[in-house]
Amino acid sequence: MHKSWRRAALAAGLTLTGALGGLVAAAPAQAQPVTSGSVTFGGDPGDYITGGRSYAYSVADGDQLTTSASADTSHVSVGVNGYQGDWWSVDFDAPGSTPLAPGTYQNATRYPFNGAGPGLSLDGNGRGCNELTGTFTVLNAVFGPNGYVQTFDATFEQHCEGGTAAARGEVHIANPPAPAPLDLALAVATDGTASSVSGKAVVHGTVTCNQPTSVSLNGTVTEIVKKTIVRGDFSTRVNCVPGTPAAWTATAVPIGTVPFVKGRVEVDTRAQGYDSEYDKYVEVNDTTVVKLVKS
């Protein structure tokens, strides 16, 4: 019953990450819900972020946690949308594009302004450091494809504005093994037709997939007719379901006045499907020589 407003609050919280210094840091990838996990932290008296208080959030207690990682897994962000309305984010960034791996990362500075060194940031509830120094230790890190975070355990300590007061905390994330990404395969048949009436070329083929998706197909048919290049574009769409090749047929209309005729043509095809598991599009390309016959 609290999901809608919690999602809205989380979106606002993630957008604010890094904004307190005047710039907004983009999230590394779409945030994924955490199946099991916790974020706990507290601070010394005088620590600006925590106000000297302690905080604890967990999925088991009804709080919503999300996480995301960059494609090279050098950066992990954890978002907290507390059941009572709190929101926080914690960012861990390895030096450069080095994947986050178990170990201690010292001399961390404020993410995303950490340059070539490690980056760290705990902020939320309207509070963030303009500058910070800190250290974090990655205890365990298991990633899947497309920045999927399966397991991530880390501890951290940060100091705002060069102060001695510190905020310290722990992050524990446990998700199921990563789902398989969309595997899209495109086949273009080596036979087609050229209409003797309209001059259009008809080509066909199949696509296969490992998850249900709508596949758009776009391409170009190119033929040389009496030293003249004849070209026409085509597009179509088919629904693909796992286990059964989805047949597609498309018609290319020649550009100009010269029609397609029987003979060999080059067919360049692009198939694109939406991967619902990772919220991204997958594209495959194919170039096939096709023999057209009269129709």
Image (tube, rainbow, N blue to C red):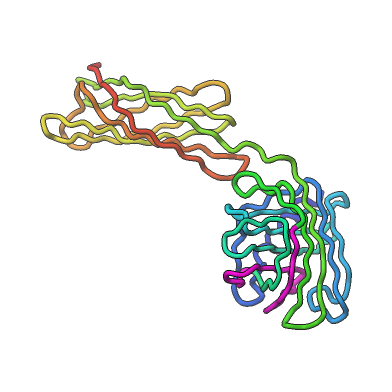
Q: Report the number of numbered marks.
A: 0
Q: Considering only vertical position in the picture, is 65 above or below 245?
A: below
Taking the magenta stretch, the answer to whether it contains residue 17 is no
Q: Which residues are magenta?
A: 112-138
Coordinates of residue 151 in the picture (x, y in percent): 74, 48
Quadrant for residue 116, please give it.
bottom right
Answer with the quarter of the image where residue 256 lies.
top left
Instruction: Give me the residue at 60% from left, 55% from top.
Output: 70
Q: Is residue 286 left or right of residue 180?
A: left
Rendering coords of residue 36 (x, y %): 81, 47
Q: Residue at x 51, y 27 (%)?
A: 208
Towards the viewer: 222 or 95: 95
Magenta stretch holds residue 131: yes
Q: Position of residue 262 (x, y in %)?
A: 20, 21
Residue 230 is left or right of residue 35, and the answer is left
Q: Quadrant of residue 244?
A: top right
Q: Quadrant of the C terminus?
A: top left
Looking at the image, residue 31 lies above or below residue 233: below
- Which residue corresponds to the image point at 38% horizontal and 26% vertical from the top-left? 188
Query: In this orientation, which residue lies closer to the viewer: 120 or 280?
Result: 120
The percent position of residue 69, horizontal first and vertical second, equals 64, 54
